[in-house]
Amino acid sequence: ILVHEQPIEKLLANPQTPARLKGQLQLVQQLRAFAETNLKLPVNGHYRKYVDVHRAFVVWNVEAAPEFSLEPKSWWYPFVGRLEYRGYFSEGSARRYGSRLEKKGNDVHVGGVEAYSTLGSFADPVLNTFILDAEGDLAELIFHELAHDRVFARGDTDFNEAFATSVGQEGARRWLRAKGDSTALESYLAHLRRNDQFVHLIAQTREQLAALYGDERTEGGKVKATKNKRDVPVEQLRQQKKRILAQLQQDYAQLKAKWGGNTEYDGWFAHPVNNAKLNSVAAYYDLVPGFDRLLELNSGDLAKFYDAAKRLSKEPKKTRQQRLRTR
């Protein structure tokens, strides 16, 4: 990827650069400045260059969980610790690894990712995978990835992704309000309302499945597979799980009808849903309400909010998660 980077300034000066791409690259420059000045995010050398990777996603993440538990499988990495996904730059490699996990009896989800953060190890480029996103979505994505450089808790996927999601959403709202673009703002806020309902639907389904599986909760609120022997036969568990996931599809159809037929989550439901796929949503959103409340407690002052989040990141994992879930 780094080999094919092109400076954005050169692309803007090149008459052969498509007009729409130029407009979006100029928007990235504005978002970058806003992130640094208004959101107090560490922009450093990020998003000064552009790369077309000639595919829809830059990375594919593999996530896994047992067939009858929502406890996510995790992998250990140098510097960042234990994470609940394994990333590949090759879709084929990701799917082959996922197949191996499935053969061991796991539920597996392989999902494409538009962007990533190297946590300051490199200057992250703008990618074709997200450059043409709607303004609110692009703003959220840029601010989300930059937020990882501001606060990061080693080995805590839920904390890191929820913090970045909270910052990304708040940043996008502030950006659109500052621009005074009421149409774009309302469109983005409507998207957030739909997203909240989608996340709530997934959370309800996870609660039903956790009860079925007999999953337990750690002190910090994380799901753990039960160590007790189940009385329910495996095939009966499988059928009950199937019914719960079928109900999720029906509930989504009703939700979509209330939205007037909006299709933005059709892609998510187009492929089979399992424990690992449900976990992929929970990782990004379970702790977001806790971070949103933390921002409110700091009267919307981002600097104080970041300091509070930084202090939380230094607490033991179960302590910080418990505090975020009970605020």
Image: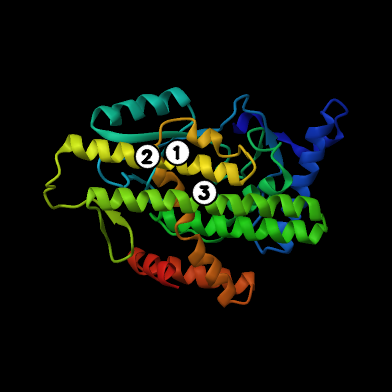
User: Looking at the picture, which amino acid does disc 1 mark?
Assistant: Gln
User: Looking at the picture, which amino acid does disc 2 mark?
Assistant: Leu
The tag earlier along the polypeptide, 3 or 1, is 3
Find residue 132 and report its image quarter: top right
Q: Is residue 62 left or right of residue 227?
A: right
Q: Residue at x 52, y 39 (%)?
A: 253
Residue 259 at least partly seen: yes
Badge number at residue 175 = none
* Label 2 with label 1: CB-CB less than 8 Å: yes
Q: Residue at x 52, y 61 (%)?
A: 151
Measured in 3D between alpha carbons, the distance from the residue under mark 2 to the one under mark 3, in whole angstroms, is 14 Å
Badge number at residue 198 = 3
Q: Is residue 193 left or right of residue 291?
A: right
**Mark 3 packing: few (<14 Cα in 10 Å), some, or many (20+)?**
some
Q: Is residue 135 left or right of residue 254?
A: right
Q: Give x and y (percent) for residue 276.
A: 37, 41
Q: Residue at x 31, y 44 (%)?
A: 73
Mark 3 or 1, which is nearer the eye?
1
Q: Which residue is mark 1?
A: 249
SS at badge 2? helix
SS at badge 3? helix
Q: Which residue is mark 2?
A: 245
Find residue 26 and report its image quarter: top right
